[in-house]
Image (cartoon, rainbow, N blue to C red):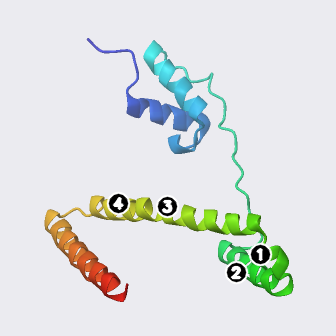
Amino acid sequence: RISSRPSRSDLGVAMTQQLGRRTEELSPIAVENAQSCRRNGTSSLRMLGPAPSLKRCRCRFPLYAQVMAGMVLGILLGWLAPQVAANPWIEALGKLFVKMVKMIIAPIIFCTVVLGIAHVADAAKVGRVALKAIVYFEVISTLALLIG
């Protein structure tokens, strides 16, 4: 018996043809509507509207320039108005920032290693990368212990 429901690939093709977009560019609501059409057995996707356009914030300055400007402003504030820079709330913000950076370092390293291993197709390469990572970790940890 042949099913009247479109397959997932047919659904993607129909969405692309109807809306002139790739499925990744559709809004979650449009994707949910398409999936409900598939569950109901209807092949008509006319109820789907175009995905709303999400505008990215296009800043005039790149991120590195913003970071450098923030550093320069912080140095100037500390030099020209040390009483403002020594306020307890500024100190608390600084400590909070450092703690947040420390908190995010471990997940970033973990995700980087996992994604790096996941993108390697050959199992032998994974073993070599793992061995290099362990040796690197041991050497750096030993140097860190020696330095203090």
The location of residue 117, given as percent across then percent down, is 27, 62
Query: Distance of mark 4 from mark 2, alpha carbons?
Result: 30 Å
Residue under the point 75% across and 64% down: 89
For mark 4, does the 10 Å Cα neighbourhood hold few (<14), some (14 to 19), or many (20 or more) residues? Answer: few
The quarter of the rendered structure image containing the C terminus is bottom left
The residue to which callout 2 is attached is 68
Query: Distance of mark 4 from mark 1, alpha carbons?
Result: 42 Å
For mark 2, does the 10 Å Cα neighbourhood hold few (<14), some (14 to 19), or many (20 or more) residues? Answer: few
Give the label on residue 115, or none: 4
SS at circle 2: helix
For mark 1, does the 10 Å Cα neighbourhood hold few (<14), some (14 to 19), or many (20 or more) residues? Answer: few
The residue to which callout 3 is attached is 104
SS at circle 4: helix
Q: Residue furthest left?
A: 124
Please identify the quarter of the rendering in which residue 62 is found: bottom right
Amino acid identity at mark 2 = Met
On the question of residue 45 being in view, the answer is: yes
**Sequence order check: which comes first, mark 4 or mark 1?**
1
Does 23 sit left or right of 52 as displayed? Answer: left
